[in-house]
Amino acid sequence: MAKPSLPQGTRDFSAEVVLKRNYIFNTIRSVFELYGFQPLETPAMENIETLMGKYGEEGDKLIFKILNNGLDNPQKQAQIKLDFEKVLAGKNIKGITERALRYDLTIPFARYVAMNHGQLSFPFKRYQIQPVWRADRPQRGRYREFYQCDADVVGSNALINEVEFTNIYATVFKKLGIDVDLKINSRKILAALAEICGGSDKLTDITVAIDKLDKIGIEKVKEELTERGLTSAQVSIIEQYLLVKGSNEEMLEQITQLVGHTETGKKGIEEISFILQYQPDNHAVKADFTLARGLNYYTGIIFEIKANGVQMGSIGGGGRYDDLTGLFDVPNIPGVGISFGVDRIYDVMEELALFPANVQNSTKILFFNLGAAEGKTAFTLMQQLRHGGISCELFHEQTKFDKQFKYAEKKNIPYVVIIGTKEMEEKTCVLKNLQTGVQEQLQQTDLLTHIF
Amino acid sequence: MAKPSLPQGTRDFSAEVVLKRNYIFNTIRSVFELYGFQPLETPAMENIETLMGKYGEEGDKLIFKILNNGLDNPQKQAQIKLDFEKVLAGKNIKGITERALRYDLTIPFARYVAMNHGQLSFPFKRYQIQPVWRADRPQRGRYREFYQCDADVVGSNALINEVEFTNIYATVFKKLGIDVDLKINSRKILAALAEICGGSDKLTDITVAIDKLDKIGIEKVKEELTERGLTSAQVSIIEQYLLVKGSNEEMLEQITQLVGHTETGKKGIEEISFILQYQPDNHAVKADFTLARGLNYYTGIIFEIKANGVQMGSIGGGGRYDDLTGLFDVPNIPGVGISFGVDRIYDVMEELALFPANVQNSTKILFFNLGAAEGKTAFTLMQQLRHGGISCELFHEQTKFDKQFKYAEKKNIPYVVIIGTKEMEEKTCVLKNLQTGVQEQLQQTDLLTHIF
C-alpha cells in the first residue's frame, strides 16, 4: 500500500509539543477557573442546519460536512441520486449530509445556551477549549484543525465583566511570561465617529479603512476614505480622530472633545473610563481608538492582545455582543467574551524561549537493567519512588550501558540509577546526573529520600 | 428556524460532568507519566485509505466520512457524478470523500509510528486520550462520539512491559477508589488448548465458545463445542480446562498438567508466572484462563479489568500483539497496550459515589455586590485572594441578597463575603459558610490569611 500520510493542513503532536501546548492550556484553564468560569464541552459534530448560514457564504463553503452513512442502501438509491443533484448545484444537501464539524466554538455555545437556557443560572460563565475544523487552504500558520480557547459571560450587561476579562488576560500572560499590550476600544465610539461623519451607514466604510492603518499608514487611509465617498471635512475629522495620542487620560480627553457630545460617544467613553479606573498601575491596558476588529456582531467594548518584542498578529481578542442566541429564537441574551490564539501564543513562546525547562521532562529517573536479579531490585526501588510521585522507568531489557544511556538522553531523562552485582551485595546504587555528569554512590534506602 | 438540537448519539458535557471526567482523565494521565509514558495527539481526520479495510467490513460502514469540499464546482460536475455512482454502489469513493474521522486510536498510532519510525527511539511508550467517532446505532451507554484512553509500548518484546501495565491498572484504580479484579491470560495458553483439541484451526471455535462461559454456563458451552465439531474427548479436555479453580498457584499447576507439555503452552505459562512473581500481595491480579478477548491480533498476554460491587462489563483491557505497523509496510514492530473505558469508569464512580466532593467546587467565594463603592472594595480583596490561588467571583450587579445567595447556591459556591456600608466604615466583612450556615465578622485584612 502507499506510504501513509496525514491529510493536508492537519498535524500530529509529539510528546514535546503536547506537553508545551498543555502548559499553555493548563495556565489559561487555571485562570478561567480562578475567575469562576466553568468548562463546557460540545460534540465535534453539529446538525448541519445549526452551522450553515452562520458564517457568511464563504464560511458555509469552509465547513467540513459529514457524508451520511448507508448511501449504498439499494432501497434509497433513487432518492439519494436526486439529493445528490442538489448538492452538485450547491443547494439543499440534507439527503447526503446531515452533520458537520464545528467551525468555531461560538455557534455551538449559542446552540447550547438556546437549548438549555431554562436550566442555566445567569450570568452564565463558561469556558471552552476544543478543536475546530475549517476547509481553508492550508498555509504557514493556518491549519484545518486547530484549537480555540474561549471564555464568555452571558446574561449580564454589567461592565464589571469586561474588567474581569482584562484581568484574565493580564494574569494569563503574566503567568506565561509574555509581555503584552492589551488594547481596548468601544464600538460605540466608532459608531459615534460615523455618526458625525456622514451618518451611521458610513460605519462599515470607516472601520474597514481604519482597520488598515497599521499596514498602509494615515495618508492611504485618507485616500481610501475619500474613495469611499467621504467629504474632505469628514476625512479631516477622522484624521483628527486617528491622530489622538498620549496617555489613556490624555486620549480620553481628546476623544471626548471629538465625539463626547453625541449620546453614543458619551456611552462609549464611559465604558472605557469604567474599565480603566479598575486597572492597577502595572497593567498594560491601553485605550486604542483605532482598534476596530472585523466581526460585525460586537456592540460595546472590544479587546485585542499584541505580544511585544516579536513580529506576530494579535494573540487574543474579543468583545461585547448584544444577542448570542437570537439566531436560535431565544432573544435578549447579551454577553461578552474573549479568546486566546493558542497556536500563535505557542509560536511567541518558542521564539522568545519562554517555556520552562521542566515542561519537557516527564521521566525523572531511568533504572538500568543489568540482569534478572538486578532488574528486580531496581523494580522494587522504582515502585517505591513512583509511590512518592517520582516518574521512573526500568530499561526494558538487559543490554550494554551504551544503549541504556542513549535511551535516557533521547528521552531527556535527567538521572540514571545503576545497580550491578557489586551494588546488589552492598545494597547500594550509583546515581548519575546526566546534566552535570556528577555520579555518586548511595545506599539504596537513601535513594528513596533523595531530593530529585 | 427549528429548535436547535444535538446530532443523535452525541452529548454536551456541562461543567459538572467535564470536571468529573477530567478527574478521571487527569488521574490516568498522571499515572501514565509516572511510568514514563508520553502523550501523543493525532488529528481527528485521517486520509480515508488509512482507515478503510482496517476494521472489517462492518467497521468500514461505521466510519464517518467527510464530504470533499468544492463539489458544486461546475467544472468538476461530470467527474463527480461518475464518482458518486460508485459511492452508491458501495465502491470507490475517492471523488466524493478523501478524509474520515478516526474510529479508534490504534490505527492512527500505527500510522504515526509507520511515518516516524526512523526518528522515534524504541521502546516507544506513548499514551493517547482523544475522542473517536463511530456511526453505530446509538443506545444506552453507546455513543457516536466517545473518548478512548490508550497506552502502548512498541518495539519491545520484554515481559516487564506487561508487568508495568498491571501496575498501571492497579495504581489508577486505587487512586480512583474502585475495587477491581485484574484478570490476565495468555493467548498462547488458549492456542495450546486448541493444539491438543483438534489442531490450531479450532482456536476460533474454542475461544468463541469459551468467551460465552459467563453468560451461558458450562453445559451450553459444551453443547456449542460439540456443534462446532469437537469430539467428546476434546470437549472433555476443554471442560477440565474450564473447571480449573483455586489460587493463582493452584490454577497454574493444573494448567501445566493440561497444556504444559506443548511448546506454546509452556511459553504461555512462563508468561503468566513471570507477571505474577512481580505482583505485591495486595494486587488483585488473577490468572483467568477462560479470558479470551475478542480481538484477533493479540498473541501473548491479555488483560481485562472488572469493577467489583457493581453490574458492569469490563472497564479496561488490552494485550500483546506481534505487529503494529505491518499494515503500513513497516514490519517487525511488536507491542503491548492497554485501554481504559472512561464512560464506564464514570458510571461506576457515579453508582458507587466515588467522586470526591471537591471535584465540583470551582468557585470558592462569592463577593456580594452592594453598590459601586462596596463593589470596588470587594473587587480589590477578591484580586488579592485570586493572587493566592483562591477562585472568587463578584456578583455582576447590585441587587437584593436573595438573588445573590441563589447564584451562590446554584453554582455550589461554599462561601459568601458581604461588605455593606457598615463593613466599609469598619474595614470588616461578613464571611458566611453556606454549608454550615455559620457566619462571622472579620477584619478585611484577616480575610486574606483565612484558610478556605
Image: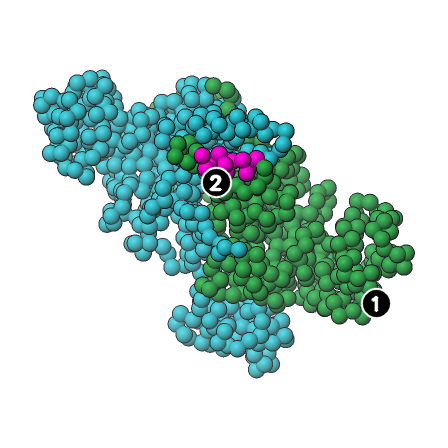
Chain colours: A green, B cyan
Residue A233 image-quadrant placement? bottom right
At horizontal 59% and vertical 48% (from top left) the residue drawn is: A53
At horizontal 74% and vertical 67% (from top left) the residue drawn is: A264
Q: Spatial distance from mark 1 to mark 2, Cα to Cα?
A: 59 Å
> Is residue A435 covered in magenta?
no
Q: Which mark is nearer the camera, 1 or 2?
A: 2
Q: Is residue B94 left or right of residue B185?
A: right
Q: What mark, if any, has residue B95 been given in the picture? A: none
* Residue A27 percent across, percent down from the top left: 56, 50
Relative height, residue B313 to residue B427 (above, below)? above
Mark 1 and mark 2 lie on one chain; the one further toward the N terminus is: 2
* Residue A415 percent across, percent down from the top left: 48, 34
Query: Disc 1: which chain?
Result: A
Tally of numbered discs: 2
Q: To which residue does mark 1 refer?
A: A257
Give the residues drawn in magenta, as a range: A78-88
